[in-house]
Image (cartoon, rainbow, N blue to C red):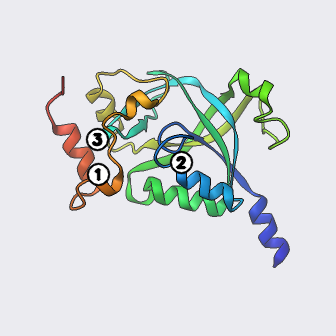
Amino acid sequence: MVAEERMQDERRSLIFTYGTLKRGFSNHTLMQELMRTGDAAFIGTVRTTENYPLVCGPYRVPFLLDIPGCGQRVHGELYAVSIKGLARMDELEGTSRGHYERLPILLELEPRDNADGGISGAFSMPCGAEGLTSAEAYYAHRSYAMELWMKNGRKGLNAYTERETKGYVKRKDRPQHLTFLDHIQHFLSSPPSD
């Protein structure tokens, strides 16, 4: 039984974070907790190999849209996450409730990580080509992703930064009588803001 548990602990998924789970942002406390318990490890900073739309939705929540070829190359962070940690992340991202979908993405290492040791030795990167790796990301659910793209004027960000967080409202401070999908539908049906 111990060997089986150890094997499960060693199985890690590579997860690309591009928004509030990144260092310095509001939901990074989850990543810190997972790192403390050994259920996640920071690998380094990365960017998408293809352009993707990264937009803000209701309450300045960031959304990566699974529309490759649109938007810009998106910068973020890469983590190796255990099965237990992944379950916690899936819960936060509402994958079972139609909020986000965890899907594959191809990334490349940011050049500065090769110099500072953020990647080397900490985790063996499963690369297809030098500096490239496959991971997973939490994309806006396909049921509303295209509408978010249109609502944002078909303009995407290359990174979710402090500037984009102005106006961000934490979950606990949002109206609790509405679901996350209600918030999205309200945002999508609201008139454009100036």
Residue tagged by mark 2?
28
How many numbered dots are placed on residues in this image?
3
Element assignment for label 2: helix
Foreground: disc 3 or disc 2: 2
Name which residue type carries label 1: Leu
Residue tagged by mark 1?
181
Alpha carbons under labels 2 and 1: distance apart: 22 Å
Image coordinates of residue 124 in percent, x first then y, are 82, 42
Image coordinates of residue 20 in percent, x first then y, are 47, 42
> Tags 1 and 3 in contact by the CB under 8 Å rule?
no
Position of 146 with respect to 122 (left or right) is left
Q: Earlier in the sequence, mark 3 or mark 2?
A: 2
Question: Which numbered disc covers residue 58?
Answer: 3
Position of 81 with respect to 193 (left or right) is right
- Position of the C terminus, as image quadrant, is top left
- Residue lying furthest bottom in this view? 1
Would you say residue 122 is visible in this rendering?
yes
Alpha carbons under labels 1 and 3: distance apart: 10 Å
Say which of 97 and 166 sits in front: 166
Q: Residues within 10 Å of mark 3 (few under 14, many from 20)?
A: some
Q: Residues within 10 Å of mark 2 (few under 14, many from 20)?
A: some
Foreground: disc 2 or disc 1: 2
Image coordinates of residue 44 in percent, x first then y, are 69, 35
Q: Residue at x 38, y 54 (%)?
A: 98
Image coordinates of residue 17 in percent, x first then y, are 56, 40
- Residue lying furthest left in this view? 191
